[in-house]
């Protein structure tokens, strides 16, 4: 018998899955090379004792990955996410450049993104003015208080049918928001004793939370929260700023980096006020950072 299921959390040799009927069970994983992660759709085989075995992983729409420290190997943290939620707050003080960088990371992974301005009750007004730059680019902004619940229902309605992850600086309120969205204290789910290590180590794997009342899922783990843009070729950065990518179509040179090249439609759009000079500076800074990384490590390729 064969059936499909979604991975809630993967622990190496076994995984917690949810079947199409909504039933949750632990399955073993067939073979060492198969590495399902939270969010994966998998095919389950059942043996004679009815125990489920994950036999294969269906093709992923997206992968959230990071470069394992030291090595060159990419580690996949979660699969099939569609939206990154960038959380900021009046406290710790928000930096627009960090938001731009998260949005670029979302673009790089093929994810949509939205911005949540949390702790809105601590803000004097609607929050920093630069927040207004994002909705016209297709990045909605939600103002919420995870502490009081204000605005959280509106946010939850917009998550319907999406699979999302929360990212943002430490202390902006990601755990509080996750718990508020779930209606219970779940932020530490996924922490398990490593069975092979005789229970001495605690590893935290990504965990897929189903939002009650909404057909939405939220994948969370310390690794997922820490997701950021890895070293990429500097010439790829312009494609990660939506408005720069769009305006760049009109540049004279199709490899234009929008610096001092003649006939640059991006610089024209900045001068005429169609592109925010702040976003443009952010682009230039990110490109320079990637250039510096590349000079240190010339092997950086498009594979990310
Ligand atoms: N005033 C106020 N405080 C909040 C709100 N949401 C969270 N906090 C507080 O902000 C602090 C940080 O919240 P967390 O949820 O732990 O933040 P986090 O982003 O998960 O932090 P990390 O786990 O370090 O990534 C806590 O003291 C929360 O009580 C809010 O809406 N308003
Ligand atoms: Zn240009």
Image: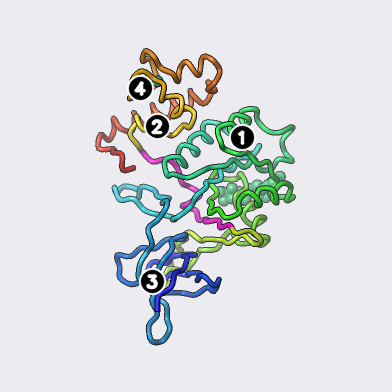
Q: Quadrant of the N terminus?
A: bottom left
What is the crowding at mark 4: few (fewer than 14 residues within 10 Å), some, or many (at least 20)?
Answer: many
Horizontal and vertical percent position of residue 78: 44, 55
The label shown at residue 256 is: 4
- Viewer-side residue, 257 vs 304: 257
The label shown at residue 93 is: 1
Q: Residue furthest front?
A: 250
Measured in 3D between alpha carbons, the distance from the residue under mark 2 to the one under mark 3, in whole angstroms, is 38 Å
N-terminal label among 2 and 1: 1
Camera-nearest label, 2 or 1: 2
Horizontal and vertical percent position of residue 15: 44, 69
The label shown at residue 237 is: 2
- Left or right of 3? Residue 126 is right
- Look at the picture and state if 156 lies above or below 283: below
Question: Label 3, on which residue?
Answer: 54
Measured in 3D between alpha carbons, the distance from the residue under mark 4 to the one under mark 2, in whole angstroms, is 12 Å
- Left or right of 9? Residue 218 is right
């Amino acid at each position: 018998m064969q059936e499909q299921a979604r991975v809630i959390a993967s622990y190496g040799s076994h995984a917690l899955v949810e079947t199409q009927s909504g039933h949750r069970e632990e399955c073993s994983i067939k073979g060492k090379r198969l590495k399902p992660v939270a969010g994966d759709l998998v095919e389950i085989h059942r043996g004679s004792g009815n125990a489920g075995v994950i036999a294969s992983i269906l093709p992923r729409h997206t992968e959230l990955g990071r470069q394992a420290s030291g090595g060159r190997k990419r580690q996949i943290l979660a699969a099939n996410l569609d939206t990154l939620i960038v959380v900021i707050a009046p406290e710790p003080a928000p930096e627009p450049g960090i938001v731009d960088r998260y949005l670029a990371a979302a673009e790089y992974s093929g994810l949509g993104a939205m911005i949540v301005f949390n702790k809105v009750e601590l803000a004097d007004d609607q929050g920093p003015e630069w927040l207004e730059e994002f909705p016209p680019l297709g990045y909605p902004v939600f103002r919420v208080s995870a502490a009081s619940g204000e605005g959280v229902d509106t946010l939850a309605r917009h998550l319907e049918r999406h699979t999302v992850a929360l990212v943002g600086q430490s202390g902006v309120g990601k755990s509080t928001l996750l718990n508020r969205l779930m209606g219970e204290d779940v932020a530490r789910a996924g922490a398990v004793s490593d069975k092979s290590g005789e229970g001495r180590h605690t590893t935290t794997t990504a965990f897929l939370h189903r939002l009650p009342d909404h057909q939405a899922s939220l994948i969370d783990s310390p690794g997922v929260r820490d997701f950021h843009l890895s070293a990429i070729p500097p010439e790829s950065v312009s494609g990660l700023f939506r408005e720069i990518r769009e305006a760049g179509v009109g540049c004279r040179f199709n490899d234009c980096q929008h610096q001092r090249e003649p006939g640059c439609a991006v610089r024209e759009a900045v001068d005429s006020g169609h592109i925010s000079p702040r976003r443009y500076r952010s682009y230039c800074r990110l490109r320079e950072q990637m250039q510096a990384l590349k000079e240190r490590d010339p092997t950086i390729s498009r594979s990310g």
